[in-house]
Amino acid sequence: MVETREIFRNFPFLLQIAFYVIAFSTIAIFIYGFYLRIQKYRKGRADARLDNLFGRFMKAAAIMGKNSTVFKRDAFAGFAHWLIFWGFIILLIGTAIVAIDHDFLRLIGVHILQGTFYLGFSLVLDVFGVFFLVGLLMMMVRRAKKPAQLDYTRNDLKPDQYNRKGYATDDKIFLWLLFLIGLTGFLIEGVRIAADRPAFEVWSPVGWAIADLIDSMGMTSAANTIHLYGWWVHAVMVMFFIAYIPYSKAMHMLIDFANLMFNDDLAAKRLPRVDEERMKVGMGYNTIQDFTWKELMDFDACTKCGRCHSVCPARNAGTALSPRDLILDLRTHADRAIGSPEWFQQTFAKEPTAGKKIAGEVISKDVLWSCTTCMACVETCPVGIEHLTSIVNLRRALVDEGNMETMLQDTLANIGDYGNSFGQSERNRAAWTKELDFKIKDVRKEEAEYLWFVGDYASYDGRIQDISRRVARVLTKAGVDFGLLYEGEKNAGNDVRRVGEEGLYEMLVEDNMAVLEKSRFKKIFTTDPHSYNTIKNEYPEFGGSYEIEHYTGLLLRLIKDGTLKINKKLGYKVTYHDPCYLGRYNGEVDAPRQLMEALGVELQDMPRCKENSFCCGAGGGRIWMDDSKMEERPSENRIKEALTLGDVPYFIVACPKDYAMFSDAVKTSGNEGKIEVKDIIHLVEEAI
Ligand code: SF4
Ligand code: SF4
């Protein structure tokens, strides 16, 4: 007996024809849905992401193959998804082999699905079929536990203002449909084996076990009938699933690969420039057609996993913003305005119409102004969605129409007039140096190895000027040759850009670059992670490429090469807050830790640390806005997190804004005396 199996086993010819008619109709519905999606993306603006297609493809394939972005910080979901993903892929390949063998190769007299190949094929498909079902079961168990990130309730709307039953239904259909397809697949294999019992089918161990069960239940005589009906149930579910893919949650199976493939590695770190053509109609996005095709694809790629929703400091503070809801609202709007609607969607008591402005109407200004631009959403999103770029592009529209808080408006005016957010004279920028008993070089007049880009807070804020002086003393003691730009320095523009004031940002870049070009230095170091980010990642697009490092890296090097001698190991416990613009934006999480290790402190990290750090709430211009209506400020939440560590007396920061935010938060959260905020330079100074 040849090891193989009959595909349309005991099927009358007419039923076979019926199957092909249904299959072709299903494929047509699938192709049409897919076509509608492509048409939708074609309505977006151009975006230059079609370079290096092979490299992009391989990058996405590596991420998908390992499921690395799903595994990140959620091993259970990652493993379950890995099982489902690989189970699905292998079952899909198996089905394709069956179709090719039966529908094409058979026509030229070739039959590959037999003999040893068939036996191996049967075994592999059974094993991956089990993977598939186990993964789905794990996901079902996870959903049954109702984790916070899968909760669809919103901060910004009352329960009677929106309805997300469509999403919840879609989630269930997606999981159950896949599960039942897998289950009925095994069932029809089992009854087929029970009916004929060919010995070689032991290579289908799951089917064989089901056949044994059928025998033990005395149902062997009904096996052929069960097979016929079971086969159709299985086939109809498969066909429905194929048709359902482009119109439902299942579309993520296709779109997420493309979204990861066209993802920008510098997304959020380097915001897009506004080209001259667009400037004529305004800096920001006003209609759905203003979004690029990649941004429109972002909206569809969202699987509603809720990871961004749960890490977002703005949402945790009780503001109107949830990055997940923002993306889903933009998807709903895009579908209604220019695309094909999903079969299962959210509805609103007051539907935004297609003609409405996006910034301020479809997405409220409260939502947009709540963002701290911490980038946690972008970093955590497993499918490469670039929330922050969309937020800033929408903020640009609000800025265009002056739709912002007075305090923010005043601060931007100060930056425009004086080059700093404090509204103080440029001449006072280096006033903090007057208390030093040495003079710091002016790199506009004399050459120095390092230029220290100080930033506004470390220059003007009375609480932080002392920290700047400590940095200057330590570096001078180490013999570092450094200088300042004095009144030539202006706000680097990082947060101005993230507020959405692109015109002012470009002006600041031009002014700073003009001074930098005339100054004499080899490298830049900065104590400000915000300045660090924009000078490193954004200035190059304007023609300013500089070697820049954060002062923690410089101090570490000075200690390592013996220039800075440690006289005493500090010995006490500390915790450290990774600044968003250093750790998450620029991956610099090791230098501060190695520095603290060299100083002999015992570092105890908070649960949210390194790339997963929790924002202080100051970024993206939030430090220039009112935060009194928040349920709990992110900085206060962070101090509470530090206090959960127990006996850790010092909260170490490496960013001037962090020092200001957390020093305040210790007081406003009533924790004075329990923990003290120190800049890392305090530790260095003490140890040397
Ligand atoms: S950047 Fe931060 S604050 Fe803004 S939406 Fe993302 S997670 Fe929330
Ligand atoms: S945007 Fe990304 S992280 Fe947020 S819910 Fe959607 S898929 Fe998940």
Image: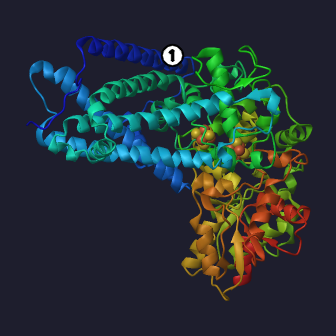
Q: Quadrant of the C terminus?
A: bottom right
Residue at image position (76%, 17%) is 356
Q: In which quarter of the image is the N terminus?
A: top left
* Total numbered labels placed on residues in the image: 1
Judge whether residue 463 can be spotted in this image. Answer: yes
- Which of 74/285 is in front? 74
Residue position marked by numbered label 1 in the rendering:
36
Q: Which amino acid does label 1 sit on?
A: Leu
Crowding around mark 1 (Cα neighbors within 10 Å: few <14, some 14 to 19, many 20+) is some
Ligand 1 shows up in which quadrant of the image?
A: top right
- Which of 167/144 is in front? 144
Left or right for 521, reference 457: left
Residue at image position (68%, 88%) is 568
Residue at the far front in the pictured view: 218
Left or right for 674, reference 514: right
Residue at image position (61%, 78%) is 597
Residue 432 in picture, x, y percent from top left = 85, 64
Q: Quadrant of residue 298?
A: top right
- Which of 419/567 is in front? 567
Left or right for 40, reference 9: right
Establish if 684 lies above or below 391.
below
Left or right for 569, reference 340: right
